[in-house]
Amino acid sequence: DSNFKNREKFVGLQASMAYFKMGRIQGLYKTSSLGYDKWAGTGLQARNGGGGMSGGAFGHTSFINNTLEAGFKASGFKGGLQYVASEKDAQKGSYLGALQYGNKAWEVTAAAANQNMDATDTDGTNWKLAGKANFGKLYLALQHESVELGDSKMGIHAKADGVDASDYLFGQVGYSIGRIDLNAWVAGIKAGDNAGSDATSYALGAKYNFSKKVNVYAGWHSTDSDAD
């Protein structure tokens, strides 16, 4: 119940090619490519403890308070910048940004997130490059992340002095047969020397779509981490 209530809350303005909003917002680092994982929002997803994408508000989960965001969309490009502005917010001075180019058949994405937490020495930066493509019924996606603001569920810890960035590599393939979508992904985490533990993960399954809003799915998800 508390998670349902405490989601996005913002005010803003929107024009044909640009927009501005402020409030409690999802990070652009998250929204720019989370949808590349066709299992996002299910028990087969790659983000957070799934072992394929970073977690946290500066990764692919949660929301960021007291944030200003400006963005645009034109000539195949879309992008935006976010800044944590409140003097009372412990993350004041943090920023996130994303730039994308493509069309309905394909897209490439570059994004970065910098968390400013000098008081606790956990400031750090995540960045990623990603792409997706549809070839008729065939779907492909690939993403690489350099992660300093990591996921403790995988034994990868937040940035501090002497902690190295970790690399996340995620790839997915999908195929549609009528109302049935078949999707599988595989991912690996290569932890920095002082960052935590390596991990390999995969998920595969099938989804039956009754409509655009209603479906059922079944599948298998496995994660093998040095952190057990």
Image (tube, grey):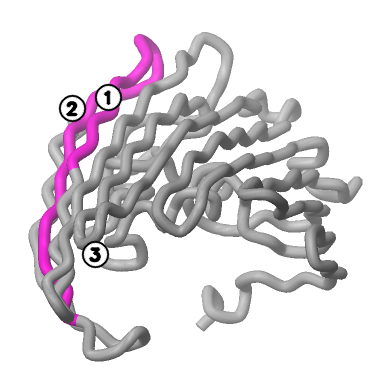
Q: In the rendered structure, does residue 66 fall within the stretch colored magenta?
A: no
As displayed, is residue 157 above or below residue 195?
A: below
Question: Residue 92 location, x and y as percent?
Answer: 81, 41
Of 21 and 118, nearer the camera is: 21
Mark 3 crowd level (few <14, some 14–19, many ≥20, 10 Å Cα) = some
Q: Amino acid at mark 1?
A: Ser
Task: Please name the residue shown 82% across and 53% down the image.
Answer: 68
Find the distance from the CA under tag 3 to the CA under tag 1. 22 Å
Circle 2 sits on which residue?
226
Disc sitting over residue 43 in the figure? 3
Name the amino acid, label 2: Asp
Between disc 2 and disc 3, the foreground one is 3
The answer to which of marks 3 and 1 sits earlier in the sequence is 3
Q: Quadrant of residue 120?
A: top right
Estimate the x, y position of residue 206 in percent, counting from the top left: 11, 68
- Contact between marks 3 and 1 (CB within 8 A): the answer is no
Mark 2 near mark 1, Cβ–Cβ under 8 Å?
yes
Predominant secondary structure, magenta span: strand
Say whether disc 2 or disc 3 marks the residue closer to the N-terminus: 3
Read off the residue under disc 1: 197
